[in-house]
Image (spheres, helix red, strand yellow):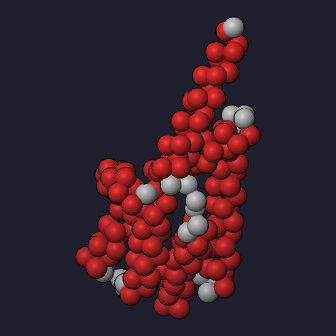
Amino acid sequence: SFAAVPFWVWLSGIIGKHRAYLVAFFMLALAHPFYLLLGEGDFWWMLPITVTTGFASGGFSSTLPNSMKADVIDLDTLRSGENRAALFFSSWSFAQKATATIGGAIALYGLALFGFDTAPEAVNGPDELFGVRFLFSTFPSLFFLTGAAVVWTYPITEEQQKETRREIETRDQARSGSSQA
């Protein structure tokens, strides 16, 4: 995913951050179901799926959302007159940890529904192994599509961001000029 970061930066410059982020969401959502078709020993069939998801993760995991978060922070700074970046970063961190916890619980509950035994010495049959493949290939896609629906209406364009930055800088210069007088 690290090697794909330059591509995502380039694409976001062409179509905008939120649209590039949506491309990453949709790539992940469309690639994951193909894992369901794989069986034991299908390494070479798995490789293009994994490369696709890894490539998409270059834009999905931190590059684009962190840049978009900075734009939201700038907009909030302009509107509120305060720099509340720490509040946004702590909220983001909490949300990531909460979703990881909830996602882990959903995964373990899903495995239990399929009767998968997680004990190291356990022998799981074809139904239990299908359950693992089913959960791994479908559930992430549902969450990626849900995330895409949330991001779909992200309102901050590059032009709006430039205007926001200019207004913040003008206001900051005016404040620093009045404090020096």
The image position of residue 135, as x and y in percent, is 55, 80
Of the pair 102 and 7, the residue shown nearer to us:
7
The count of marks equals 0
Q: Is residue 46 visible?
A: yes
The image position of residue 67, as x and y in percent, is 50, 47
Residue 104 occupies quadrant: bottom right
Q: Is residue 105 positioned above or below 93 on the image?
A: below
On screen, residue 158 versus residue 164, left or right, reads: left
Farthest residue to the left: give it. 44
Of the pair 174 and 124, the residue shown nearer to us:
174
Measuring 34% from the left and 69% from the top, which residue is drawn there?
A: 52
Measuring 68% from the left and 77% from the top, which residue is drawn there?
A: 109
On screen, residue 109 versus residue 60, left or right, reads: right
The image position of residue 133, as x and y in percent, is 48, 82
Q: Quadrant of the C terminus?
A: top right
Q: Is residue 140 positioned above or below 36 on the image?
A: above
Measuring 69% from the left and 66% from the top, which residue is drawn there?
A: 102
Q: Quadrant of the N terminus?
A: bottom left
Residue 154 occupies quadrant: bottom right
Residue 106 occupies quadrant: bottom right
Q: Is residue 125 visible?
A: no
Farthest residue to the top: give it. 181
Of the pair 131 and 31, the residue shown nearer to us:
31
The image position of residue 10, as x and y in percent, is 33, 53
